[in-house]
Image (cartoon, rainbow, N blue to C red):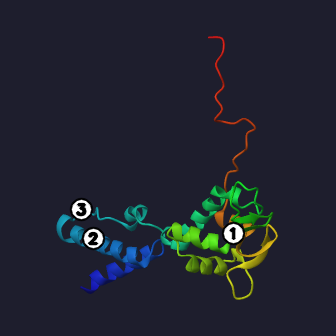
Amino acid sequence: MEEIREIYDKLSEELSQHTTSKQAGAAALILTADILMDMLLFEDGKALTVRNLLPHLASTKEVDQNERAFEWLSNWIVQNRAKLTGASDGNVEVWGKVSDDRDYILSSVFRNACESAGQPSVPFLNWLRRNGLIDHDEGAFTKLVRIDGIPSRCVCLIKSEFQKRQGDFAEVPVDEVDPWTVTPVTGA
């Protein structure tokens, strides 16, 4: 029995370097059982290995709700860029503003958007603050800024820190030609 426990502990420790402890424990149990089956029944040396299971396990980063929320927020900002102009033209709601180095999102808009996406806003804001991704007033998650001349509490995202966290990415060129415009075929 002690040998079985040692096999399990060794596998669990190795797997914990790549995934959550919950997944590591379950995967180690499967691998331990397969090793025992090979030792006691099959004796063919073809037991599963950690390498066999790793592609089927989620990394700690993939499981992290805040990392998923970060990806969602990055996409949400791009999706709602027209509403982050900082001034109302009468046609579009103002949800914040964008400057060269910061994105400001009205705190109520941020909270509602997070909740709509199933991301609890307070734990996410804590994570953003801990990771240096937001600028904020002392003891708060927000910063007081003027949007369209009105003082407003905003979540202030630091663009340079966001870009560092996102890593390298391809820049999509903006063509002068609208790709959706159909060019008529002539001379058939």
Gap in Å between the C-alphas at discs 2 and 3? 11 Å
What is the distance, in whole Å, between disc 2 and disc 1 at their CAs?
Answer: 54 Å
**Which disc number belongs to residue 35?**
2
Q: Nearer the viewer, residue 117 or 129?
A: 117
Q: Are marks 2 and 3 in contact (CB under 8 Å)?
A: no
Q: Earlier in the sequence, mark 2 or mark 3?
A: 2
**Looking at the image, is mark 2 or mark 1 earlier in the sequence?**
2
Where in the figure is residue 80, as x and y percent of width and height? 65, 58
Label 2: how many Cα within 10 Å (few below 14, some 14–19, many 20+): many
In the picture as drawn, the residue positioned furthest to the left comes out as: 41
Q: Which mark is residue 44?
A: 3
Q: Nearer the viewer, residue 141 or 9?
A: 141
Please tell me how crowded label 1 is: few (under 14), some (14-19), or many (20+) other residues with Cα within 10 Å: many
Q: Secondary structure at mark 2?
A: helix
Q: Are marks 2 and 1 in contact (CB under 8 Å)?
A: no
Q: What is the secondary structure assignment of the residue under circle 1?
A: strand
Query: In the rendered image, which residue does mark 1 sit on?
Result: 105
Q: Residue furthest top?
A: 188
Residue type at mark 3?
Answer: Asp
Can you give x and y, in whole percent of width and height, for residue 114 in the image? 56, 70
Q: Position of residue 49 (x, y in %)?
A: 36, 66
Q: Nearer the viewer, mark 3 or mark 1?
A: 1
Q: Residue at x 41, y 66 (%)?
A: 57
Residue at horizontal 27 percent and vertical 86 percent from the top: 2
Looking at the image, is mark 2 or mark 1 nearer the viewer? Answer: 1
Q: Which of the 4 quarters of the picture holds residue 160?
A: bottom right
Which SS class for mark 3? Answer: loop
Task: Name above or below for residue 7 compared with residue 168.
Answer: below
